[in-house]
Image: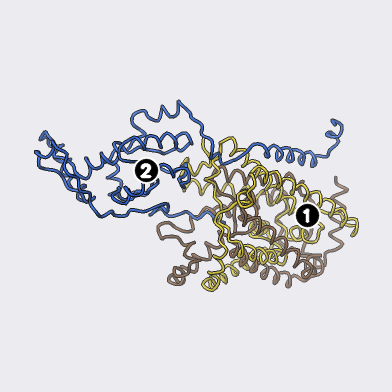
Chain colours: A brown, B blue, C yellow
């Protein structure tokens, strides 16, 4: 076991150029087992709440509430924001998704801490500078934010949750995400490999 | 065969289990359970105890005045009768169209027709399909007519009954009816002229006043 | 016992928020353990060097799908009460493409970026800022795209009902497809590893 981890560590050390990443060689678990675990969490959400997981919705609520605070008339006149602001009776921030996303932050931190994987750094491939990586991260985030809202969901909401209930649109979305990713992968390969 | 199975890696074993379950799914049928009806005698008998399956007309009148929106009021008669007069906030779902309606199992549903019969029949059907909150309007439209629209003056002159009658007068006015104070008329059935305005009658679906909780992602 | 519990008023909205938090924690732990808090692992999906994303995602979907299906068949879960997003085919196809590009350029998706932020990745923080910006742009542009956003509306439709297949058959086909994808992924990874001589994480 230790020889394998040593090999992995060395393989990465040879490639890194700016010394931002060093791997604490705790290898990740069997992906299928992780998948089953994730599937059970998904199932729990369905059985308990009758809905699946999500992520982008929480961010939309935050954006909508912020816009509403700064320019309430503009927000309520806009059909996209007004949906996330609600009817004024309940606090829009007391939202199921927001609490779930907060949980993800906590859960990720807990799991990372246990496995010594909480390391400040920038994830990137060997052939790109950190600055460019951050630029691409912003652009990529913008594209994903836009695309996810257009499709009424992101990977967690549409692909995972919609996939479980065999939602037609969700499966179509999932396939297109893979298509878009693979299509663009060639052009952005300097960032990763 | 056994040797083949034991020689599979852990991952492949998982895959085999998944394949088996998927294969079983081919034969286990519809997960919506829509077409079959399971009658649970005990359950149904229990729910009739203490009239917990019924809603009185005065109760219903109260809910409507208070603008309660957490229930679905269903008129089971045909459309013609519904258009002539129906209780405000009622949706028209004739008995024959019941299976294609959009009623959900976790909704509070109050059923009525002219008398109790159709409502009881539908109550039974829905209970067998595992609907949880189904209620019969006690006495149906006939009782509504008698007690809410055209309440009669009480025979005795006890204080509570008089106070109750005063309240019912207001209720009757609210629904477009009128209290019957002339005691001589109370023997023969008065010519019932239904109030022509049907406030807030909605045709089908779209429950009003209940904000749909956003459940997307 | 009736499920989904929330739909049968077993608990109120406030409790549901606590449950949301708890489920989120479990979600976060599962994601982090899967290595999804790292953009390099997520992106290697698209270069065939590490197919974790595909394996975890499809395993999760198959697990939950089988679970939900069988629980519904035995009558424990009322499937008609489980939320189904409406399908607007065109915007979902276009949105998927854009999101896919965003995924490989940015290296995260919304859920995984949260895990990455929690484990200290600065690029993830920038990514989240980007997402917020993208959502904001979408919101501001909304009046212009609103018509497209609502186009090709198909209602809340499932694959079985659209293709007129039995639900169980589609479940079986999805399992087959997933197993096929796993086999292809394992084969692809081996080939790439042999090609580049690198050990995958």
The image quadrant that residue B161 belongs to is top left
**Residue C4 tag number:** none
Between the residue at mark 1 and the residue at mark 2, the CA separation in whole angstroms equals 57 Å
Name the side, left or right, on which B136 lies relative to C190: left
Q: Residue furthest front?
A: B80
Q: Quadrant of residue A191?
A: bottom right
Q: Is residue B89 above or below residue C123?
A: above
Does the image show residue B152? Answer: yes
Say which of marks 1 and 2 sits in front: 2
Q: Disc 1 marks which residue?
A: C51
Q: Quadrant of residue C46?
A: bottom right
Q: Quadrant of the N terminus of chain A?
A: top right
User: On the same chain: label 1 and label 2?
Assistant: no
Circle 2 chain:
B
Q: Secondary structure at mark 2?
A: loop
Residue under pointer 2: B76
Task: Give left or right: position of C30 versus C137.
Answer: right
Residue occupying image coordinates x 55% and y 63%: A60
> Residue A169 placed where, x, y %?
62, 57
Q: Residues within 10 Å of mark 1 (few under 14, many from 20)?
A: many
Tell me residue A12's x, y (percent): 84, 59
Give the structural element (helix, strand or loop) at label 1.
loop
Of residues B96 and A74, the one drawn nearer to the viewer in this rendering: B96
Q: Is residue C74 left or right of residue B162?
A: right
Rendered position, C92 above or below B215? below
Name the spot of residue B23 as percent of width and height, x first: 72, 39
Q: Position of residue B85 (x, y in %)?
A: 28, 49
Label 2: how many Cα within 10 Å (few below 14, some 14–19, many 20+): many
């Amino acid at each position: 076991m230790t020889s394998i981890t040593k090999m992995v560590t060395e393989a990465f050390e040879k490639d890194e150029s700016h010394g931002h990443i060093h791997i604490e060689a705790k290898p990740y678990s069997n992906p299928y087992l992780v998948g089953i675990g994730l599937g059970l969490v998904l199932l729990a959400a369905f059985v308990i709440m009758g809905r699946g997981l999500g992520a982008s919705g929480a961010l939309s609520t935050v954006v909508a509430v912020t816009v509403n605070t700064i320019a309430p008339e503009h927000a309520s006149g806009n059909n996209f924001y007004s949906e996330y602001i609600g009817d004024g009776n309940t606090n829009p921030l007391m939202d199921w998704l927001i609490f779930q996303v907060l949980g993800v932050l906590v859960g990720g931190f807990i799991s990372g801490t246990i496995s010594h994987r909480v390391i400040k750094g920038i994830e990137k491939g060997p052939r790109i500078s950190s600055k460019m990586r951050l630029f691409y991260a912003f652009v990529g985030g913008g594209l994903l934010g836009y695309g996810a809202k257009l499709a009424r969901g992101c990977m967690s909401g549409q692909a995972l949750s919609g996939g479980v209930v065999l939602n037609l649109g969700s499966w179509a979305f999932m396939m297109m995400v893979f298509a878009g990713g693979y299509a663009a992968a060639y052009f952005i390969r300097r960032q990763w490999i | 065969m056994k040797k083949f199975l034991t020689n599979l890696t852990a991952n492949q074993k998982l895959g085999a289990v998944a394949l088996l379950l998927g294969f079983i799914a081919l034969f286990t049928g519809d997960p919506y359970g829509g077409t079959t009806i399971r009658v649970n005698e005990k359950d149904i008998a229990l729910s009739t105890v203490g009239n917990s399956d019924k809603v009185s007309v005065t109760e219903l009148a109260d809910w409507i005045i208070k603008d309660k929106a957490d229930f679905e009021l269903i008129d089971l008669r045909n459309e013609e009768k519904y258009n002539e007069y129906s209780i405000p906030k009622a949706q028209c779902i004739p008995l024959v169209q019941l299976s294609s309606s959009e009623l959900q199992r976790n909704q509070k549903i109050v059923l009525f027709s002219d008398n109790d019969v159709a409502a009881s029949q539908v109550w039974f059907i829905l209970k067998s399909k595992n609907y949880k909150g189904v209620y019969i309007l006690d006495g149906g439209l006939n009782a509504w007519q008698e007690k809410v629209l055209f309440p009669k003056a009480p025979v005795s002159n006890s204080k509570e009954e008089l106070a109750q009658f005063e309240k019912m007068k207001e209720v009757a006015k609210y629904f477009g009816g009128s209290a019957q104070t002339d005691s001589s008329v109370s023997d023969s059935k008065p010519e019932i002229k239904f109030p022509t305005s049907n406030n807030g009658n909605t045709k089908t679906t779209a429950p009003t006043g209940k904000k749909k909780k956003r459940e997307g992602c | 016992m009736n499920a989904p519990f929330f739909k049968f008023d077993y608990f109120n909205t406030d409790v549901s928020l606590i449950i949301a938090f708890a489920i989120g924690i479990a979600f976060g732990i599962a994601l982090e353990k899967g290595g999804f808090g790292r953009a390099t692992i997520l992106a290697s999906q698209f270069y065939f060097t590490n197919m974790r994303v595909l394996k975890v995602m499809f395993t999760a979907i198959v697990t939950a799908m089988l679970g939900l299906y069988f629980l519904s068949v035995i009558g424990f879960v009322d499937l008609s009460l489980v939320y189904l997003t409406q399908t607007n085919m065109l915007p979902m196809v276009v949105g998927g493409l854009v999101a896919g590009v965003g995924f490989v350029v940015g290296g995260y998706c919304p859920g995984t970026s949260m895990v990455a932020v929690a484990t200290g990745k600065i690029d993830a923080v920038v990514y989240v800022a980007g997402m917020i910006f993208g959502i904001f742009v979408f919101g501001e542009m909304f009046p212009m795209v609103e018509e497209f956003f609502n186009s090709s509306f198909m209602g809340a439709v499932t694959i079985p009902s659209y293709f007129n297949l039995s639900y169980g058959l589609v479940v079986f086909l999805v399992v087959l497809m997933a197993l096929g994808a796993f086999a292809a992924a394992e084969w692809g990874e081996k080939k790439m590893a042999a090609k580049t001589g690198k050990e995958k994480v």
